[in-house]
Amino acid sequence: MRRRRPILGVISGIVFGIFLALDLALFGIVPLDSPVLTIALVVGIVLGILVAVRPWGGGEPRGLKTDIVPPAAVAQAVSGEAPAAVADTPAPPPPPGDAPSADAPPPPPPP
């Protein structure tokens, strides 16, 4: 469930409304004594509250889907096999001579 933050929305809306009013005034779109600047501040507050209270992204964040089952578990459940104990089986050691060890000196440069 998504948390709603109306106080943060009001603060963000005030900041948005102030910058909107400043842009309108400094770019000369509306005069400084116009009531449009006050309306821009109120519109910013309303938009901030709307964004903060409305659940835009749905109820659950996208990264926390707990109902997804890996395909291997589904195949084991369908076939009736017991799950393999992955943690109990150690990884096989690498074959000797395939990878140089960290203690081995580097090979000589070509002539």
Image (cartoon, rainbow, N blue to C red):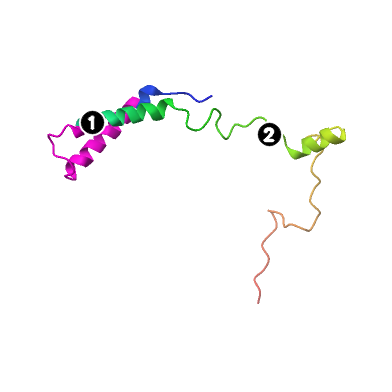
Give, as a three-letter code, the residue at label 2: Ile
Secondary structure state at the residue bearing disc 1: helix
The residue lying at 22 percent from left, 41 percent from top is 23
- Indicate which disc residue 68 carries: 2
Crowding near pointer 2: few (<14 within 10 Å), some, many (20+)? few
- Indicate which disc residue 82 carries: none
Decide which of 63, 100 is in the foreground and name it.
63
Quarter-wise, where is residue 65 in the image? top right
Give, as a three-letter code, the residue at label 1: Ile
The answer, for residue 39, to whether it is visible in the render is: yes
Span highlighted in magenta in the image: 10-37
Q: Position of residue 98 (x, y in %)?
A: 77, 58
Q: Label 1 belongs to which residue?
A: 39
Q: Position of residue 35 (x, y in %)?
A: 17, 31
Q: With respect to residue 90, does 1 lie above or below?
A: above
Quarter-wise, where is residue 31 in the image? top left
Decide which of 15, 109 is in the foreground and name it.
15
17 within the magenta span:
yes
Q: Of tags 2 and 1, which is closer to the observer?
A: 1
Q: Position of residue 45 (x, y in %)?
A: 30, 28
In the displayed structure image, the side of residue 35 where residue 48 appears, left or right? right
How many marks are shown on the rendered structure?
Answer: 2
Q: Position of residue 79 (x, y in %)?
A: 87, 36
In the displayed structure image, the side of residue 55 where residue 29 appears, left or right? left
